[in-house]
Amino acid sequence: MEKTISGVIIECVKGDITRQPDVTAVVNAANAWLRPGGGVAGAIHHAAGPELDKECRPLAPIKPGQAVITGGHNLPNKYVIHCLGPRYGVDKPEDRLLADCYRNALKLADEHKIDSIAFPAISTGVFGYPVQEAAEVALRTVKETIPSLRHVKKIRFVLHSDRDLKIHEKVLESL
Ligand code: AR6
């Protein structure tokens, strides 16, 4: 499903973040050292190839809430924006740190004149953030950030399961 807010399309789809050829940037749910790891980070590095790891090394470490940008290498996207989400119950306040990820990623995208960007559900895997809570923070932050964006025209959430998709769709509907 999709919704347009102040001329910016927000959409929720089920899929794989590494298979979004029609967006300019994809977001990585990274680790502090920007290394491959598992989950989204593993999939992105695997698809992008070893040159992404090389480009990442001098940019690490990053802090929870921070975002950095690299090229997409062998991915079908021009850029990867790497965000370190909070570990639920560990990095606090987690809602502010998660909001920082979305805000900083969108700001960075806009600075690079990126028109379309796809996010995974940052922190909801290994980092243990409950999906409902994370979806509320993510979508609220996106809505709040949209008025300050000049170039970003499409924001996609790519969810890995039907359950996560449904949760995000409901939150988007209620925005
Ligand atoms: N496309 C879209 N979503 C995915 C994909 C994919 N290919 N693979 C997993 N997900 P996670 P985190 C979903 O664990 O919680 C890594 O090891 C997944 O179901 O990737 O921020 C890093 O190295 C979940 O809903 O990110 C870090 O150490 C969501 O994406 C740590 O995990 C995020 O899951 C980061 O943990």
Image: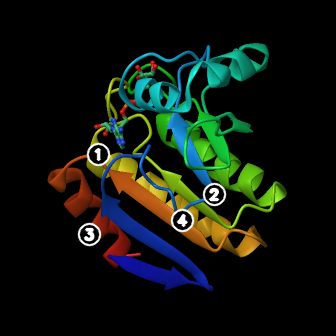
Residue located beneath label 4 in the image: 155
Q: Residue furthest front?
A: 74
**Residue type at tag 2:** Thr
Residue located beneath label 3 in the image: 170
Beta carbon at label 4 within 8 Å of ligand 1: no
When the figure is inspected, residue 15 is found, relative to residue 115, above or below; the finding is: above
Of pointers 3 and 1, the one earlier in the residue sequence: 1
Residue located beneath label 2 in the image: 24
**Residue type at tag 3:** Lys
Residue 116 picture quarter? bottom right
Q: SS of the residue at dot 3?
A: helix
Q: SS of the residue at dot 2?
A: loop
Comparing 17 with 86, the one in front is 17
Cα gap from disc 3 to disc 4, whole angstroms: 16 Å
Comparing 139 with 23, the one in front is 23
Beta carbon at label 3 within 8 Å of ligand 1: no
Q: Does the residue at mark 4 contact the one at mark 2 (Cβ under 8 Å)?
A: no
Left or right: where 74 falls relative to 112: left
Q: Does the residue at mark 1 contact the one at mark 2 (Cβ under 8 Å)?
A: no
**Residue type at tag 1:** Val
Residue 171: percent from left, percent from top:
32, 67
Residue 24: percent from left, percent from top:
63, 57
Categorize mark 4 by other alpha carbons within 10 Å: few (<14), some (14-19), many (20+): many
Coloring basis for residues: rainbow
Q: Can residue 14 be seen in this view?
A: yes
Residue 131, numbered label: 1
Residue 145: percent from left, percent from top:
66, 64
